[in-house]
Amino acid sequence: MHHITLSSQTDFDGWRKAARALALNDVKPSDVSWRVADDAPELFEPTAAPLEPPQGTFNVPARFVELAEITILHRNPERFALLYRLLWRLRMHHDLLEPATDPDVAEITAMAKAVRSDEHKMHVLVRFREIGREQKSHFVAWFEPEHHIVELAAPFFARRFADMPWSILTPDLCAHWDGHVISFTPGVSRSEAPSTDRLEETWRRYYASIFNPARLKVQTMQKEMSRNYRRNLPEASLIKPLASDDKASDMPRKHADDIETLREEAAECRACHLYKNATQTVFGEGRQTARIMLVGEQPGDKEDLAGKPFVGPAGQMLDRALEEAGIDRRTVYVTNAVKHFKFVPRGKIRLHQKPNTPEIKACRRWYERELAAIKPDLVVAMGATAAQSVFGKITPINKNRGRAIDLDDGTRALVTVHPSYLLRLPDADAKAREYRRFVQDLKIAADVLRKSAHAA
Ligand code: URA
């Protein structure tokens, strides 16, 4: 008997080298036993003559190598032997893999599928919890994979969460990302992973607000998601009460988020790179019952420092125009399409930079959730960036201003210029003329407001 000891559960190179030497020495699969270094050694091991250094070579189909690389990650301890048996047989029957009716081929195919499925589940079911705050924060997740997939799945998280340092702890192996490289350490027990964080309740509320019982397939969920997967999901305990519409007292509200919850969540937003240089997220402000929602471009220097929208020079221009149009700013909700200040430093000042389309798109999730929370009668998009976010596409101002437009999502929108545009106009006459047009547009908004108040 030949006893082969691999260095780890995922030691594909070790398996490949050993399998090649065994095959070239004509060692039958039944004469080989496989195990992994950290497994308990067998007590009395009958030994075989040492293998000759491998002479010659042989080829196997590339598909076998692909399958073997994945199958070796399966938790079945028989996988090494199965793979060697297939390799042995492939030397005689090169097209063995073609009809998948052969029991060994069917087994390896099913094992590879199970590993891929486990990898996919890890990608979608890992939930990070934050440890520490701000610059020192680190995101930690606990996951219990069915197979040895941590090394396989880790690069996905490095790409997806490139900007945040994270660790995924599992009982087999832990993966860590420091923003540059992935490293691995031995597995740990569940008690080492954080079980909750300050964002957890927000996530549970959000989950409850988007939960759709019509889309819940209980049997599929139970079949596809073992108890190990399910119990690590923060939302897991909500599914049953939500599905049965049970109004348990600790259940989060089922309607759209409230603005304060959104504000807290957005404070942690890293959906684009703008958070890195900005002081803070500047979220929308105003009453949740507001009938008008004003959308600007992005916070400026003053807003970035104050954490409030439209408090600088553009805000003063807006306040004046709102007053002339007969709208009390305290009754409207004011926000921006992009919620972090984008700028380039020039000496002591920070020069405003227009946000680009990926930045607008990354931030649109917040606009959508603000819209769902406020449900205004009218959204006023001020300037091109706001119009792009509100309409979901580039929307020229002059062609569309002056009338309320019905959007596909049921929102009514009015397009106008941005107050900063008025500030930048060098010519006094043009400035006065454009200001009057701006007030005129806001009067249309005031009119919509009056009509909806009458209709109510
Ligand atoms: N410009 C904007 O678009 N928003 C602000 O909050 C300030 C200036």
Image (cartoon, rainbow, N blue to C red):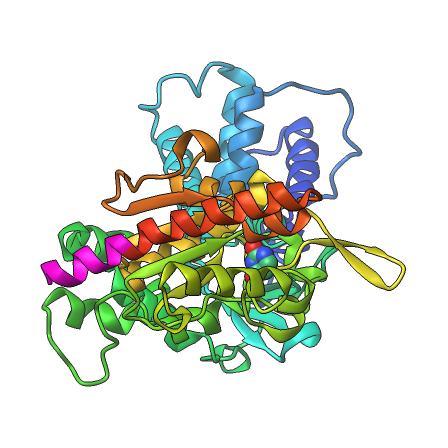
Whether 379 is drawn above or below 397: the answer is below
**The furthest residue to the right:** 347
Taking the image as shown, residue 346 lies to the left or right of residue 36, namely: right
Taking the image as shown, residue 286 lies to the left or right of residue 153, namely: left
Is residue 448 located in the magenta-colored stretch of the structure? yes
Is residue 285 located in the magenta-colored stretch of the structure? no
- Which contiguous range is marked in magenta? 447-456
Identity of the residue drawn at 44% across and 52% down? 439
Whether 101 is drawn above or below 426: the answer is above
Q: Position of residue 360 (x, y in %)?
A: 53, 46
> In terms of secondary structure, what is the magenta stretch mainly?
helix
Identity of the residue drawn at 66% across and 37% down? 16
Residue 172 seen: no
Q: Nearer the viewer, residue 82 or 183?
A: 183
Q: Position of residue 163 (x, y in %)?
A: 66, 57
In the picture, the quarter occupied by the C terminus is: bottom left
Q: Position of residue 242 (x, y in %)?
A: 17, 68
Q: Nearer the viewer, residue 249 or 348?
A: 348
Question: In what quadrant does ligand 1 lie?
Answer: bottom right
**The furthest residue to the bottom:** 249
Identity of the residue drawn at 47% across and 80% down? 198
Tally of numbered discs: 0
Q: Nearer the viewer, residue 6 or 255?
A: 255
Q: Nearer the viewer, residue 387 or 159?
A: 387
